[in-house]
Amino acid sequence: MTSKNDIIKVAHVLAGAAQGGAENFYTRAVCELAKEPGLEQSAYTRPHPQRQQAFASANVEVHTFKFGSVAHIIDRYRYQRALKQAKPDIVLTYMNRATSLTPSGDYQLVARLGHYYDLKYYRHCDYWIGITKGICDYLIGAGLPADRVVHIPNFVNETQSEPLAKTSFDTPKGVPIIFALGRLHEHKGFDILIRALASMETQAVLWLAGDGPEKDSLQQLTQKLGLNDRVKFLGWQTNVNSLMKTVDLFVCPSRHEGLGSIIIEAWFNQCPMVATASQGPKELIRDGVNGLVTPIDDVSRLASAMASLLADPGKATQLARAGYREYQQHYSRDRIIKQYTEFFKKIAK
């Protein structure tokens, strides 16, 4: 039985948006780590009702702050004072703002990087977690000590979900469904996906889940290409597993992508996949084995890859099953939580 003296206190700090891949993983990781004996989790984040409810259900102590601009000097002081008073053994920060606002202290300061961020926000940390090997190489190449850079990937929500009706979102019966998900940002390449859809002879429908600054321009492009009936803008969706179980094909058309946790979600749900050769997907996917990979910004190659899998369900199923095996071997919840737990035990002061 673990005594109080053996407990490792871990504070997780996120100053991110209401929705997003990093934000979802933050919530998931804190709640799952709270189940592990010998660890005590606490969360420091912006107010967010759903996230706070998830933490309450997992018996995780949560502290909320604005994490705003330099004008919020009192809020910054409140956060740093609360962190100091909590006396954590480890502070794990997520992304730029949380890391830059968290000073060194009488704890091990660990930054988790899900992308190739500007390292001016991170150099004061004690350890760095890269969620891909490419990010780890980037950190070491930038001069951070290799023995303090650790590779720990993401895991996904492993809740088993039932598929939706394929006629959801006013989708015609019997039409192939392509699915894409993410922040509607230029980096995600959804404009290329919409253009590829327009060039396909197959009259597939695209379910595009997410929101962001490019929403208006993507809707205008959809209208310009005459695809209003074939592109369904779903907004942010929380039932990703159900969506993956429903559709015929998942596509990640990103120009820049650190890991692409959505790749791992597709594998877990055995959803056939096409992705562009951005940083994370290129590292994860073996082309023709557990997914298809096409060049970035190549409309015709993307359209061809999508059409080939829609026309060959046997091949699509083969890729999806191989992706599921990849998930179980390298990205399962139990495997990743074990890596975090062992890492915390190793570095705790």
Image: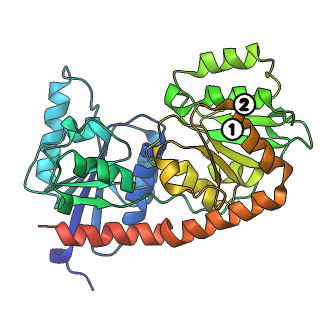
Q: Residue furthest bottom?
A: 1
Q: Secondary structure at mark 2?
A: helix
x, y percent for residue 41: 30, 60
Q: CA distance from mark 2 to mark 1?
A: 6 Å
**Residue at 27% from the left image edge and 65% from the top image edge:** 40
Residue 187 coordinates in the image, percent (x, y): 49, 30
- Give the image location of residue 342, x and y in percent: 29, 73
**How busy is the neighbourhood of tag 1: few (under 14 within 10 Å), some, or many (20 plus)?**
many
Camera sees residue 131: no
Q: Which mark is residue 233?
A: none
> Mark 1 belongs to which amino acid?
Leu
Hey, which quadrant is residue 245 in on the image?
Answer: bottom right
Q: Position of residue 112 (x, y in %)?
A: 31, 50
Q: Which residue is mark 1?
A: 302
In the image, 338 versus 272, the foreground residue is 272
Disc 2 to disc 1: CB gap under 8 Å: yes
Read off the residue under disc 2.
Answer: 196
- Colour logic: rainbow
